[in-house]
Amino acid sequence: MRDERIDEVEAECNRLLLRIEDYRTANEKLKAEANLYRANNPGSSFYIQDLPAHTGAIRRASMDLTRALAKMRRP
C-alpha cells in the first residue's frame, strides 16, 4: 500500500465524518424549530424536511470514500 493512497482514504473519511456532523447539527436545529413552532401553535402541524442537501452530501462523500478504498486495495 502506498502512503498517498492511505492519505487519500483518510481525507475522504474525514470529509464523510464532517458531512455527517453537519447533517446532525442541521437536523437538531430543525427539530428545535419544530418543537418551538408546536409549542407556540398548539394543534397545528409542522413538516420536518429530509434535509436533501445534507443527505446528498453524505451519499457523495460515502461514494468517494468507497472509491478511495477500492483504489487503495489495488496493487
Image: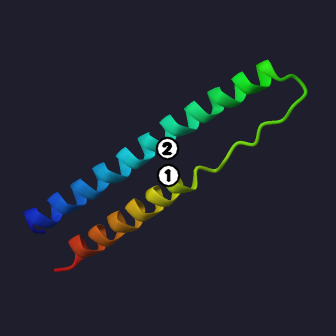
Q: Quadrant of the N terminus?
A: bottom left
At label 1, counting other C-alpha atoms closer than 10 Å, the crowd grade (few under 14, some 14-19, many 20 or more) is some
Measured as percent of width and height from the top left, residue 10 is found at 23, 54
**Residue ID at (42%, 40%):** 21
Say which element carries label 2. helix
**Residue ID at (51%, 55%):** 53
Q: What is the spatial separation of the Cα atoms under label 1 and label 2, in whole angstroms?
A: 5 Å
- The type of residue carrying mark 2 is Tyr
Q: Is residue 48 left or right of residue 38?
A: left
Q: 47 or 65, which lies in front?
A: 47
Q: Is residue 22 left or right of residue 5?
A: right
Query: Is there CB contact under 8 Å for labels 1 and 2?
Result: yes
Name which quarter of the figure residue 39 lies in. top right
Name which quarter of the figure residue 65 lies in. bottom left
**Residue ID at (9%, 68%):** 2
Q: Residue furthest front?
A: 41
- The type of residue carrying mark 1 is His
Q: Is residue 50 above or below residue 48?
A: below
Q: Is residue 1 above or below residue 12?
A: below
Q: Residue furthest right?
A: 43
Which disc, if any, is residue 2? Answer: none
Q: Is residue 10 left or right of residue 3?
A: right
Q: Residue furthest top?
A: 40
Name which quarter of the figure residue 74 lies in. bottom left
**Residue ID at (28%, 58%):** 12
Which disc, if any, is residue 23? Answer: 2
Measured as percent of width and height from the top left, residue 26 is found at 52, 38
Measured as percent of width and height from the top left, residue 5 is found at 16, 66
Q: 23 or 67, which lies in front?
A: 23
Q: What residue is pinned by disc 1?
A: 54
Q: Residue furthest left?
A: 3
Going from N to C along the chain, the mark reached first, 1 or 2, is: 2
